[in-house]
Amino acid sequence: MNSLVKDKYLIWTAIGVVVCVVSLGIAIGIGNDFNDDNFVRLIVFLCCNVFGWLIYLFFQSFIFDAYQIYRMKFGKKESACEIATATEQTECIAASEQISQEPAPQEPIAASEPIEIHIDAQRHADSRANYANREKQEEEKRIRAVMEYIHYYMPRIADEQTVNHICTEVHQWMIHHEYKPNPILRKLPKLVNSVALRHFVWNIAERFMYKRYYSGDVKANFIRALFPEEFIDTDCDTTKNFKVNPRSTEIPIDDPEGNNLNFHYPEDYQPKHTI
């Protein structure tokens, strides 16, 4: 226990003994005056105790200050053992603070694989070939779907030879957007106006692989070149108006629904090829 705390306990004990002795003496003296009445002695003893402790509390700071001055001038110096103990405690506290301030050891970071920046010639060739193969498969799938669409609608307005001619020219046009078709020089067996044919070229061009190359002028020039007789009285600007009466012709407008590029057929018809 700290020596200062011990000294405080000793002072309190001494003050308590003095207060009790003085209170007892006063109580005995006053009790004699009241024919040795013990009740009076008890009351006097308690009152003296309370009064004594009040005096102590009033002069407490003075008492302890005086004791500290006495201790500094005449008190014994701390023993070597106490000094050594205090030094050890100080060193332990400093060591613990130093340990808490030191960063925790980090786990070793596993070596990562080097980032591949350049590509070797073989891998580059394989990647290009893979991309070209997937692109070719996608284009073939779209061509099959368009050919099936032509085979479904065109036989009702053209003969077999004309339908095959249309399929051939459309196939070439799907491969290259600047292709100039060979014209159909004879009239179609069934009289149709240019609106149905404009619907036709709009519907198929919406399913082409590279639709961005097939602008309104490109589509208008193709259909006018393929069917010159049907568009002899229709100028280019009128031809580019592809969605005229979208539902009232032999070939209605067939817009794709979002990412689904399949054509819309009657419920009783099951297409063989889809996109």
Image (cartoon, helix red, strand yellow):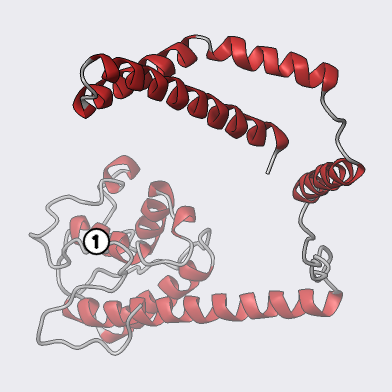
Q: Is residue 60 above or below residue 115?
A: above
> Which residue, given by chain and number where applicable, does mark 1 sit on?
255
* On-image quarter of the N terminus: top right
Q: Is residue 220 above or below residue 5?
A: below
Q: Nearer the viewer, residue 95 or 210?
A: 95
- Residue at 54 percent across and 65 percent down: it is 176
Quadrant of res 154: bottom left
Image position, residue 230 (x, y; %): 25, 59
Image position, residue 56 (x, y; %): 48, 15
Few, some or many C-alpha atoms within 10 Å of disc 1 (few <14, some 14-19, many ≥20)? Answer: some
- Residue at 16 percent across and 63 percent down: it is 252
* On-image quarter of the C terminus: bottom left
Image position, residue 104 (x, y; %): 76, 56
- Residue at 36 percent across and 82 percent down: it is 164
User: In the picture provided, is 131 more to the left or to the right than 202?
Assistant: right
User: In the picture provided, is 129 more to the left or to the right than 150?
Assistant: right
Q: Nearer the viewer, residue 30 or 16?
A: 30
Q: Residue furthest left?
A: 248
Q: Residue furthest right?
A: 80
The residue type indicated by label 1 comes to Asp
Element at label 1: loop
Q: Is residue 252 above or below residue 97?
A: below
Q: Is residue 219 visible?
A: yes
